[in-house]
Image (cartoon, rainbow, N blue to C red):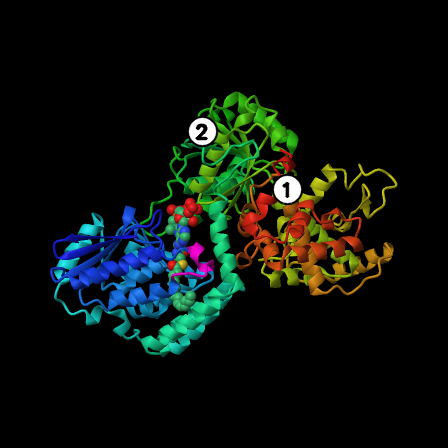
Amino acid sequence: MAQYARSPAVAVIRLRNPPVNTLSFAVLQALEDGLEKADADPSVKAVMICGENGKFSAGADIRGFSSPNRPVKSLAALVSLIESSKKPVVAAIEGIALGGGLEVALGCHYRVAHVKARMGLPEVTLGLLPGAEGTQRLPRLIGVPAALDMITTGKHIPATEALKLGLVDEVVEENTVEAAIRLANKVIGQPLGPRRLSLKPVPKLPDMEAFLSQARVRVKKQAQGCLAPELCFQAVRAATQMPFADGVRRERELFMVLLSSGQARALQYAFLAERAAQKWTTPGGASWSSATPQPVRSAAVIGLGTMGRGIVTSLVKANIPVVALEQDLEYLNTGRKAVMLLLEREAMKMEVGAQTLDFHNPARLQFTVDFDSLRDVDLVIEAVFENMALKKEIFHKLSRICKPGALLCTNTSALNIDEIASATSRPQQVIGTHFFSPAHVMRLLEIIYGRHTSPTAIATAVQLAKALKKVGVVVGNCFGFVGNRMMFPYVQQAVFLLEEGSRPEAVDRVLEDFGFKIGPFRMSDLAGLDVGWRSRQGQGLTGPSVPAGTPARQRQGQRYSPLPDLLCESGRFGQKTGKGWYQYEKAGGRTATPDPWLHSLLAQYRDTHGIEPRFIDQEEILERCLFSLINEGFAILAEGIASGPEHLDVIYINGYGWPKHKGGPMFYASTVGLPRVLAKLHKYSEAHPDVPGLQPSAFLKKLAAVGNPPIKEWMSYLSQQSSRL
Ligand SMILES: CCCCCCCCCCCCC/C=C/C(=O)SCCNC(=O)CCNC(=O)[C@H](O)C(C)(C)COP(=O)(O)OP(=O)(O)OC[C@H]1O[C@@H](n2cnc3c(N)ncnc32)[C@H](O)[C@@H]1OP(=O)(O)O
């Protein structure tokens, strides 16, 4: 709702819709009523619009875009109504003015912002454009380059930058509402024509056409298959080519194209999924709503390899004092240099005037080889090699040294959290924190609770993720957890496709065209093929421990491909050795080129194993890779390893390069239709009966059988008893 009050000559309209004052029908109606009341009252000489609870508005209600009664049309009309008011209207922007919220402010004649406020038009990140005339007003106010940048990236800008751009008229450190009322009183009686943005011309550039064509190339490159940035561009270009009213018509047409696109639905789902994934529960009944985190005032990181360096950097950036520990001075010095380099780079990226990184102060970042230095820290993150014996030795030590309440985290991508916890006397404080490389850049943090992990420990790890500006997703303990467990059948299918006749570059192209940042073979080369090789050796799938007489392409009655092992045996570990599924310009090189050596290995391999190569089309490549990954997702949900499909989707978008505009693997399955996914899995598993990853999971079958319910209803079809935890 919007609340109406008076401050002698100034009518005060307060947007009120907790928690972020979204522009619901009721809010828009009350705002309209407030404007009419102010217009009709001769004692009112000016109007001030502000938001409740220190926030202006987060814009339209994202949940409303999929509803048939969306209030989008009236929002544009209301912005025009504000602008045409005969009495000056001032926006008092505190906290946030985003999307439709900023468009309301653009309809106002003046804008005053608090110094800590942020503004932006993030519609593009939701697959939309600022359709309440924002694409036409903003370029008129701040010029085409700045407007195009804000509209096509959706970035939030701080008030100080907004002032420089001319987006706001005043930035204040004290009470914004009072400052806005002061300004409103001051401008009473001044002409409003020059303040009405729809009447202003778009500022000219020396060569607008050249600027626009360069900008378009940039926008296309950044879009990576997403439609909204291009349509945002077109709407802003319309502002440079047409009168305001025609530009608005064009904006509306483009908005409708986006609104009805699958991409907008997927991106809006992804936004809400990220919020839903914060609401964790465990099959044991622990939940985000009842667990309280412990404060983390200091932390330690053990191991300064690639992961440890990134984790230390993340903690320093979050302003958490860190003790970084290595096994000896040589490793410590190498690690220290690498961390300092990362931090220097991060410091350079930080905005001028923002808080600086205090990493030269030993009270904030200390390097040591002495375990005793970890005595007082609130939290330890162990980030050594994926070696169970080593991890257990470290956790045994930690359990003796660390203070009683300290949270003990292990950075692992697959190892059993319960086994690691068994080396301590406090398994309730042991938790898995699976960071993704580079750890100071990647947003995902998979948080894995073990059998004994306490709700407080989970809540503390979730709080840590927030402090590090990451998305923490809480999952149960199983081999590979969620992300890598779903990845396994995907990569396995990709390799089987090579055996049957395809090539790495063909498989990668299909998945990159689908929208993955890199395909499975490029990804394996980047991650290092030796990682999986060591793990398979450990599991007895390859190497000397495989029993004599085991068929080359079978393990425990299931299909197995020794192809990745053959590459590793030839020293081809991927980018780091300059050769893997592709060849590279040098060891450590990044430019992948198809490798004739590999093509002849594949031909030879098929000959040896009597495989008749066949042409495999794009559809089969896509379906076998994606549907096997999705199928594993259904098994994970049925086992209670994750609380909902949103959790899986958030993991894939933020940790595995799944295209956000396709909403994540489980959302994608819902758009394809579960009966179709099921039918395809049936077809492929009949053709490959020795591949368990292709056999449809019981949960998928159930959902298809009950009539393909919408994704938000899936979990209600799962009986409590199916949880294995
Ligand atoms: C029908 C025919 C029509 C034809 C005519 C065509 C013309 C149409 C023209 C109309 C065009 C309309 C244009 C307007 C579009 C928009 O405004 S789209 C929305 C743009 N805004 C955003 O993208 C902001 C999104 N929100 C955020 O970035 C953050 O939430 C925040 C505001 C910065 C706050 O962050 P934080 O403090 O970290 O809290 P969160 O946990 O993220 O959020 C708190 C809760 O608030 C919910 N929420 C936030 N924003 C929205 C929103 N815009 N809509 C709905 N809900 C929102 C969020 O989900 C959290 O809720 P819970 O999960 O329940 O806790």
Question: Looking at the image, which residue is at 59% across and 27% down?
Answer: 421
Question: Looking at the image, which residue is at 86% across and 54% down?
Answer: 609
From the image, tell me which residue sits under label 2: 378
Residue 499, by quadrant, is bottom right
Disc 1 marks a residue whose amino acid type is Ala
> Could you tell me which secondary element the residue under label 2 belongs to?
loop
From the image, tell me which residue sits under label 1: 638
- Image location (x, y in percent) of residue 552: 83, 47
Of badges 2 and 1, the one in the foreground is 1
Question: Looking at the image, which residue is at 50% across and 59% down?
Answer: 265
Q: Is residue 435 above or below residue 24?
A: above
Residue 36 is left or right of residue 223, and the answer is left
- Image location (x, y in percent) of residue 169: 22, 60
Residues drawn in magenta: 62-71
Disc 2 marks a residue whose amino acid type is Asp
Q: Earlier in the sequence, mark 2 or mark 1?
A: 2
Q: Is residue 468 above or below residue 34?
A: above
Residue 284, by quadrant, is top right
In magenta segment, residue 341: no
> Is residue 207 among what the camera can see?
no
Q: Nearer the viewer, residue 304 or 376?
A: 376
Residue 153 is left or right of residue 721, and the answer is left
Q: Give me the disc on residue 276.
A: none
